[in-house]
């Protein structure tokens, strides 16, 4: 008798086959990556792009500022803006590894669907956290499975992947937490304006930050920018910039193997002592000691370090 395979089981099998060992795997399908971990991890720091991360097996904890989000099998984490977060796999084993598929969201797809003639038009919503968790719908699961199946048909990727990615974006926009993603695309919304401020900081994190300049660039008052920025990111603009600086400095020391003083200077610190003090406050110990411990724990430079999960 033929046994039907559940979509989530087929997706788990696909991820296991294309991600045979622990780590993060980019794929021939643009913006799509696979993740596998056979044991719980310590917290890792990530600069997360707008994306959807769907867990097929296991569980994960994501911390944004003082807010913590848990999600597990057949749930997804939707990130609507660039955010510096801590990520920890909390449920995984050799027999049942943590399996996750991540799709970076194309802002052009979001904009086209929000302004398209057939787009749903919900009532405007206030600015909210840039991260949210929801259950996976059958329609979303089906679309994600079809996208992952293209890994076995690379000759079909160019023609079909853009269509399926657009469908996935549509499912997310019209899902229970899609209003946040939709809100980011509306030029008149506070979320969109904060997104502009976030984008400026992301590309200029090593430069001095003047709140009045940032507010003017976002077309907001300073008090409005501060309020809505903290609502979305759980941080003030200054805290956001500091975390980006420290995460990038840590990456430079890990990946490029440069010394702490050079790393601090490259991310915008004029004082090595200030950099070391703020780094120790964020990561728990002095820069080079922390980097040495991370290397020892991971056995190698963690590929997950700069990958959105």
Image (spheres, rainbow, N blue to C red):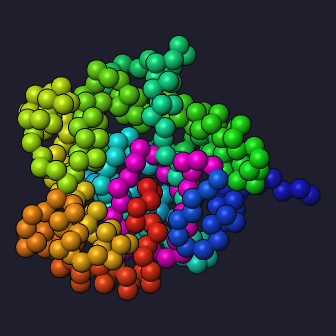
Residue 157 as seen in the image, left or right of residue 172? right
Tell me which segment is drawn in magenta.
29-56
Specify the principal SS of the magenta part: strand
On screen, 210 above or below 20? above
Position in image of residue 266 (x %, y %): 22, 63
Name the residue: 28% across, 47% down.
Answer: 203
Locate residue 93: give its quadrant.
bottom right
Residue visible at 89% across and 56% down in the picture: 2
Left or right, 54 with respect to 143, comes to left
Left or right for 252, reference 141: left
Q: Is 101 in the magenta?
A: no
| Picture quarter with the N terminus | bottom right
Total marks placed = 0
In-front residue for pair 214/185: 214
Where residue 234 appears, as percent x and y from the top left, is 22, 48
Magenta region includes residue 30: yes
Residue at (14, 33) in percent of width and height: 215
On screen, residue 227 versus residue 300, left or right, reads left
User: x%, y% of residue 137?
Assistant: 57, 40
Q: At 53% across and 65% down in the image, what residue appears?
A: 24
Q: Quadrant of residue 217?
A: top left
């Amino acid at each position: 008798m033929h046994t039907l395979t559940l979509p989530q089981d087929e997706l788990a099998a696909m991820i296991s086959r294309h991600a045979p060992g622990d780590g993060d795997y980019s794929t021939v399908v643009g913006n799509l990556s696979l993740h596998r971990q056979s044991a719980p991890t310590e917290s890792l720091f990530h600069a997360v792009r707008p994306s959807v991360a769907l867990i097929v097996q296991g569980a994960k904890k994501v911390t944004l500022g003082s807010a913590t989000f848990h999600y597990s099998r057949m749930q997804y984490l939707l990130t609507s803006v660039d955010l510096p977060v801590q990520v920890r796999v909390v449920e995984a084993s050799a027999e049942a590894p943590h399996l996750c598929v991540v799709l970076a969201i194309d802002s052009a797809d979001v904009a086209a669907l929000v302004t398209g003639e057939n787009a749903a038009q919900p009532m405007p919503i206030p600015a909210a956290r840039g991260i949210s968790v929801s259950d996976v719908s059958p329609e979303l699961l089906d679309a994600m499975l079809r996208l992952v199946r293209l890994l076995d048909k690379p000759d079909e990727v160019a023609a079909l992947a853009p269509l399926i990615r657009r469908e996935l974006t549509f499912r997310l926009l019209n899902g229970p937490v899609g209003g946040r993603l939709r809100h980011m695309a509306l030029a008149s919304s506070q979320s969109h304006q904060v997104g502009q401020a976030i984008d400026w900081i992301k590309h200029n994190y090593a430069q001095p930050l003047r709140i009045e300049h940032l507010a003017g660039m976002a077309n907001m008052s300073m008090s409005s920018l501060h309020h809505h920025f903290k609502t979305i990111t759980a941080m003030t603009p200054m805290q956001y910039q500091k975390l980006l600086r420290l995460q990038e400095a840590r990456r430079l020391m890990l990946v490029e193997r440069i010394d702490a003083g050079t790393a601090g200077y490259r991310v915008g610190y004029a004082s090595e002592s200030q950099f070391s003090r703020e780094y120790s406050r964020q990561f728990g110990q002095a820069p080079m000691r922390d980097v040495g411990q991370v290397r020892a724990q991971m056995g190698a430079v963690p590929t997950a370090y700069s990958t959105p999960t």
